[in-house]
Image: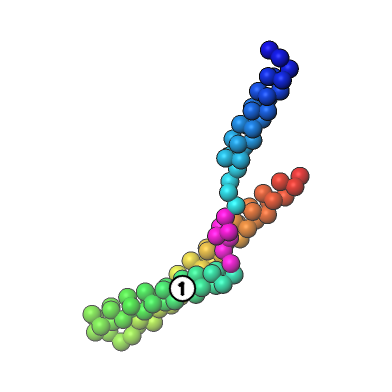
Amino acid sequence: MTDDDQKQRMAQLEAKIDAVKKARQPAARADSDISGGELAWRMVIEMVSGLGIGFGIGYGLDSLLGTIPVFLVLFTLLGLVAGVKVMLRSAKEVQDKQAAHMQAEKDERD
């Protein structure tokens, strides 16, 4: 085997290795990060949907049972609590994603 053949085979092997490395790297996606506006709208929707569902259940029970708006107030408050709980869970999820992203960037630099 000549020296030129060996150099050519090494260059082909390095090209294949580079192609495999590039294929295994995760593609950087612009839509992977949630912007502040999207997060705010998500939280507003979660809060309003919790309130709306609680209001609907309470109103339905009050009209079905013929009571004063006891269930309406009770289930609206429960919907508020559920909305806040879901909203806080979403905020924690986004915070954890950002922390993991920051840690990954820090690890790449080191």
- Relative to the observer, which residue lies in front, 11 or 52? 11
Q: How many labels does the image show?
A: 1
* Residue 93 visible, this orientation: no
Figure colour scheme: rainbow
Residue 67 at x, y percent in the picture: 27, 84
- For the point 58% across and 67% down, the residue is 35
Would you name the residue on which mark 1 appears? 45
Q: Does the magenta stretch include residue 34?
A: yes
* Residue 101 visible, this orientation: yes
Left or right placement of residue 63 versus residue 37 in this view: left
- For the point 71% across and 46% down, the residue is 108
Q: Residue furthest bottom?
A: 68
| Residue range (magenta) | 29-35
Residue 1 at x, y percent in the picture: 68, 12
- Relative to the observer, which residue lies in front, 22 or 90? 22
- Give the vertical position of 79 relative to 9 (above or below): below
**Helix, strand or loop at disc 1?**
helix
- For the point 63% across and 52% down, the residue is 100
- Give the vertical position of 100 relative to 94 (above or below): above
- Relative to the observer, which residue lies in front, 105 or 97? 105
Left or right placement of residue 57 versus residue 107 in this view: left
- Relative to the observer, which residue lies in front, 36 or 45? 36
Residue 8 at x, y percent in the picture: 68, 24
- For the point 55% across and 68% down, the residue is 39
Residue 9 at x, y percent in the picture: 65, 23
Q: Quadrant of the C terminus?
A: top right
- Give the vertical position of 32 relative to 84 (above or below): above
Left or right placement of residue 99 versus residue 47 in this view: right
- Give the vertical position of 22 relative to 95 (above or below): above
Q: Which amino acid type corresponds to the residue marked 1 in the rendered image?
A: Ile
